[in-house]
Image (spheres, grey):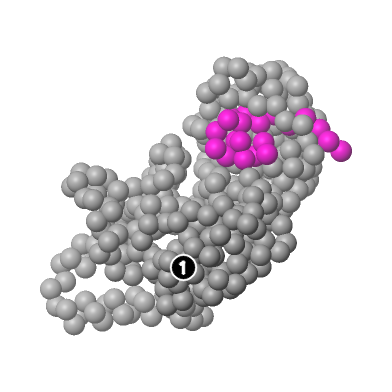
Amino acid sequence: MAERVAVIGGEGNMGRLTTTLFQHIGHETVVSDVANPNTLTPIEAIRSSRIVFFSVLPIAEIPKILAAAADIITPDHIILDNASSKTPLIQTLNNLANKGLSVCSTHPLCKHDQPLHGQKVLLMDVGPRPEQARHLAERLYTQAGMVVVEMPFEAHDHSMLIVQGLPHLLWRAVGEVYAKRGIDPEALQQIGTANFRLFDLAMWRTLIQMPEISSEIIRNFLDQEEGNQLVTDLQEAVTSIIASDDRTQLSESLRQDADQLDQNGIRTRMNEISTTVLEGLANLDVESLMVISPVDKAGVLEKMAGAFAKAGISLTEIRSHVSDGTVKFRIGIDEKTSNPTTLKRAITLLIRRGFAVIELPK
């Protein structure tokens, strides 16, 4: 049954995405966001809706909003959130759940601007009656093709220490060093090794995120005893490696670390995965086009690839990105089968078939 959903923080990146996802499963949405005074206030939005979804930064504002709305929140309300850190919410959400509200906390493990299909989302039951909220969260995310992973609510922030907190801390620190030393990241990419390319991608994946998100994650990481211990362990490891002037001894120590971590053949699997990623990126670097389909439907890939085949061009890589109903294909071209004549013919065929084509610089 369609209901009205109040999305608090609905004009932020994840807020807009969440609003769209609710609309896709047939719910009416109202938005409240302090960044836009023309939207409803949180009190007005909550009063007009039975379902309330929080997508708010700073996260500590969520308990304040709920406290201000205490007089209008009833046991019939369903409460959800997508905060990346849960510690600021534990007491408030548990209190609401113990008053009879259905509460489920969520954490999509991806950015708002990437295709959601196949991405993971954490769902966390809160209190004794989470069923309505969890069922709604499952519908919300699975209709977008996301993979649901359930975890205990109180365990979230501890579980995220290494997979979320440590990367944000490390990559933001590296970014600060680059900025202070005036390092040119474009120049580094021109001469970077394969290992550096993976390193650089991981760093930029963090740097392009909102600093407010990293700030929340890093502070929550450092507010936990184990987070501080991980920092101490890291400092000790770096100090130990730097202090080792015996290359043979250092090599043996590093080998032992890798061997200890190589459980169930993960070293081989990660080598295959990283090699495949690097091969694809290299193929795109040789020569590539951006081909854009105005529609996302079955047969688009065959129609697009067929134009290259008809022009006599072999493809070395195809990467796709779905956005707002369109599909962007990044195409790697085999330079041995490509020349100005065949490339022009392929582009002409693509345009006739309804695609837009952007030639990318080498």
Relative side of 231 to 50, left or right:
left
Q: Residue 23 placed where, x, y %? A: 74, 38
Tell me which segment is drawn in magenta: 1-20
- Mark 1 highlights which residue? 341
Q: Residue 74 placed where, x, y %? A: 77, 25
Residue that sits furthest to the right in the current view: 1
Identify the residue at image location x=52%, y=43%: 85
Q: Give the quarter of the figure containing the C terminus.
A: bottom left
Taking the magenta stretch, the answer to whether it contains residue 112 is no
Instruction: Using the rendered image of the protein, determine whether residue 275 is visible from the camera's viewpoint.
Output: no
Residue that sits furthest to the left in the current view: 245
Q: Depth check: give the residue in front, 34 or 230.
A: 34
Q: Is residue 137 above or below residue 88?
A: below
Q: Residue 223 placed where, x, y %? A: 41, 42
Identify the residue at image location x=69%, y=42%: 21
Q: Residue 92 placed where, x, y %? A: 61, 32
Relative side of 297 to 230, left or right:
right
How many neighbours does mark 1 have within 10 angstroms: few (below 14), some (14-19), or many (20 or more)?
few
Relative side of 77 to 290, left or right:
right
Identify the residue at image location x=31%, y=65%: 196
Write down the quadrant of residue 217 in the picture.
top left
Relative side of 215 to 177, left or right:
right
Identify the residue at image location x=49%, y=32%: 58
Q: Give the quarter of the figure containing the N terminus.
A: top right
Write down the quadrant of residue 68 in the picture.
top right
Query: Dot 1 lies on which element?
Result: helix
Q: Depth check: give the residue in front, 302 or 129.
A: 302
Taking the magenta stretch, the answer to whether it contains residue 3 is yes
Q: Depth check: give the residue in front, 53 or 201.
A: 201
Q: Depth check: give the residue in front, 245 or 212.
A: 212
Q: Amino acid at mark 1?
A: Thr
Instruction: Using the rendered image of the protein, determine whether residue 203 is visible from the camera's viewpoint.
Output: yes
